[in-house]
Amino acid sequence: MGSTVLLRRPLALIVAAIAVVTMVDVAAPSTAAAAPVPAAPAFGSIIDPYSEYESESTCDPVDKAGPRAVRDLLIDTYGPATVYISRTCVSGGSSGHYAGRAMDWMRDINDATQRDQVETFLDWLLATDQYGNRHAMMRRMGIMYVIWNRQIWEAYDSTPSWQPYYGSSPHTDHVHISFGWDGAYKRTTYWNPAATFPAVPVCATPPTQPAPPAVNYGSGLGYVRVTPSRLLDTRSAGSGVAVRCRLGGGGRLDVKVTGVGGVPASGVGAVVLNLTGVSPDAGTWLGAYPAGTAWPGNSSVSIARQAITSTMVVVPVGSNGMISLRNGGGRTDALVDIVGYHPLSGGSLYAAATPIRMLDTRGTGDRFTARETRTVALRSVPPNATGVILNLASIAPAAGGYVTVSAGGSGSTGGTSALNMTVGRVVSNRAYVALGPGGTIDIHTSTATDVLVDAVGWFGPTGTRYMPVTPTRSFDSRNDIGGLVRFSGGSAQELDLVAAGVPAGATSVVMTVTATTMSTPTYVTVWPHAQPQPPTSDLNVITTADTSNLVVAALGAGSLDVLIGHGRGHLVGDVVGYFR
């Protein structure tokens, strides 16, 4: 039985080619009893990360240990069946079968017993375990993706979920399972269940960088956009790390940010990055700061246990063109995407605006559909603007997934994401985005969702310049820093940023805002002091974990007004720079 697999991201083609493989044929069981679940070892709390996508272009048609073991598990649980593993390689195609790390379990969806067996097994693979680990057995077995009944589940998606599958085979007569290399060789916790088993090593701490030289920012810095690209992905050897690893609690990684990704090797004052934490084994945060300096006590993105969360950050360049990441808690994977930089000379200038809601698909019948790319014209943006600073939010997504945003007409739908969606949550993130013709942007959603877009300003030939600073805690309502106290819904507090060290001549501030110990899910809005509250939001928060976002806000007489919509809770803010 052949399988043709077309993956969304990245694209792969599995060409049908059948070889003699391990198989056992018997009649389907006649019992109508509910299908059992496989027997599993007793696991500790340590679990494997989601399998990354690993190219299936290798030719080594020998059945690997992982697929053989899963085949045996299926036969032990559900009875004899036909199972195909390796295949003879075919020129011009790619398939996990060619490397013996994919398997086809022959089950017919029209046979009620076989269908129940498959669905029971898949539910077992994707269930949350006793420690709260989502998709536990899928991860413990090192499974990369599964295809069944016109749907595909990809572990390497930003928030894995079942998605429509458009390959030529509907996979209604078999289940296709592809393994990552760790799963293929049984280098995972399912086969090594001891609580101390290091499924993935902790990233080695790099040598301490020398202190960076003093930099004269002069009257301030302009901004230059680049095509977003990934500088660090701890899930993949060679992508900013020598070997696949996870950043341990209290650990540090240094990331090269100059001379890469379209950023010059010199003459760069600060970089604009999208920082993502992926599936920590306990709630944690990541702080970004200049390499060669002591960690200043900041946090840039807060990540709940097993979640995938992104936040935009602006970081001064440290020693040897690097920035540092510090992990505050559970072991986590980390991704860093470059989106732009602030050069020491040249670049576009920034013009702040009263926050404007540019798009709100709720209640309009204009909800985004799965894998839709839509061009959106941003009203009120001047014709000479080259880029814009937005706040993006997804509301009520149909499944976990991602949102990308790019210049209008660019057709970009992947590579790096601007927002990672979570079912049951409103998720927001700041985005620095290039503009296409007519002041347009392209928004692509991997799954159906409502989308909000708020603009806070734009880049062009006139405006203000950016001044980076070492991240500094400017307010913390838990400790009366900045003169703020615990927030109550609907009641704004004034934040005097001049008193917090921002110069009186600053017109806008850039800071990371974190919400903590919230009594109810709500939103945070920040706007210039003594001006009317805008109908926009800067941060959407939950009660079960801290939530962070980058805030870029115009100042009113050196101050901001800050409000939460409902309930009670605390806010913490770290200033990373300002425009003047």
Image: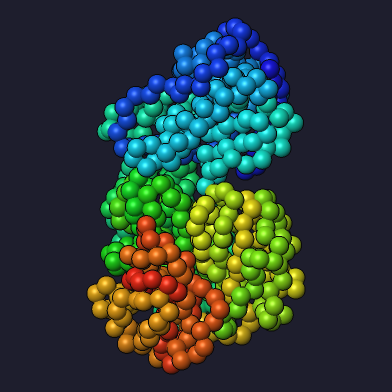
Relative to 143, is 47 on the left or the right?
left
Going by the picture, which residue comes out furthest to the front? 32
Query: From the viewer's perspective, is residue 539 above or below residue 103?
Result: below
The answer to whether one can see residue 550 in this image is no
Residue at image coords 67%, 79%: 381
Residue at image coords 52%, 67%: 430
Which of the two residues, 168 or 28, is positioned nearer the viewer here?
28
Going by the picture, which residue comes out furthest to the left? 479
Asked where in the image residue 213 lies, by quadrant, the reply is bottom left
Relative to 442, is 476 on the left or the right?
left
Residue 441 in picture, x, y percent from top left: 68, 66
Residue 301 in picture, x, y percent from top left: 40, 61
Residue at image coords 62%, 18%: 106
Relative to 344, is 295 on the left or the right?
left
Which of the two residues, 351 or 402, is positioned nearer the viewer here?
402
Looking at the picture, the colour scheme in use is rainbow
Residue at image coords 71%, 34%: 167
Residue 228 in picture, x, y percent from top left: 58, 58
